[in-house]
Amino acid sequence: SEGLRWSAILYKELNLSLCLSTGVHTHLDVLKAIMSGADAVQMASALLRHGAGHIRNVLDELHEWLEKHEYESIAQMKGSLSLHHCPNKAAYERANYMQTLQEYRT
């Protein structure tokens, strides 16, 4: 998503917090946001659709995933899929440029 891409690009580039506010419905969406560099997520649509109890489900599934993949904390994974941690920044930027061009044409 566009939000994930920009979160991954801006992580560690700006001295501010990043919040992903679209497309966050499940624990996997939360994980993608955090790994891209987001500090927070907004889940308004998911809560309107599933009710406030959905938060507990997402948190339980998130905790389960962290344990299964041997992460000790969310901070440990934060930004792990960002441009900041990419070994070939030029290739990352080129791929994002190509993605942007493809989205523009459609």
Image (cartoon, helix red, strand yellow):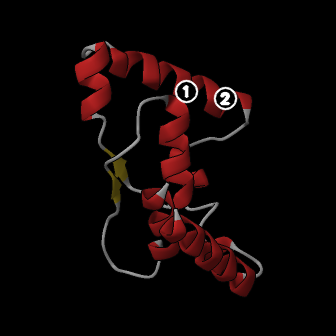
Instruction: Report x, y in % for residue 81.
Output: 64, 61
Let me know if residue 35 appears in the view. yes
Pointer 2 local density, CA inside 10 Å: few below 14, some 14–19, many at least 20: few
- Tell me: residue 72, above or below residue 11: above
Residue identifier under label 2 = 67
Q: What is the spatial separation of the Cα atoms under label 2 and label 1, in whole angstroms?
A: 6 Å
- Residues at badges 2 and 1 in contact (C-beta under 8 Å)? yes
Instruction: Report x, y in % for residue 102.
Output: 59, 68
Instruction: Report x, y in % for residue 14.
Output: 37, 80
Pointer 1 local density, CA inside 10 Å: few below 14, some 14–19, many at least 20: some
Q: Which quadrant of the structure image shows residue 51?
A: top left
- Tell me: residue 56, above or below residue 45: above
The disc at residue 103 is none
Let me know if residue 78 appears in the view. no
Residue identifier under label 1 = 63
- Which residue does the image show at 41% across and 38% down from the upper left? 24
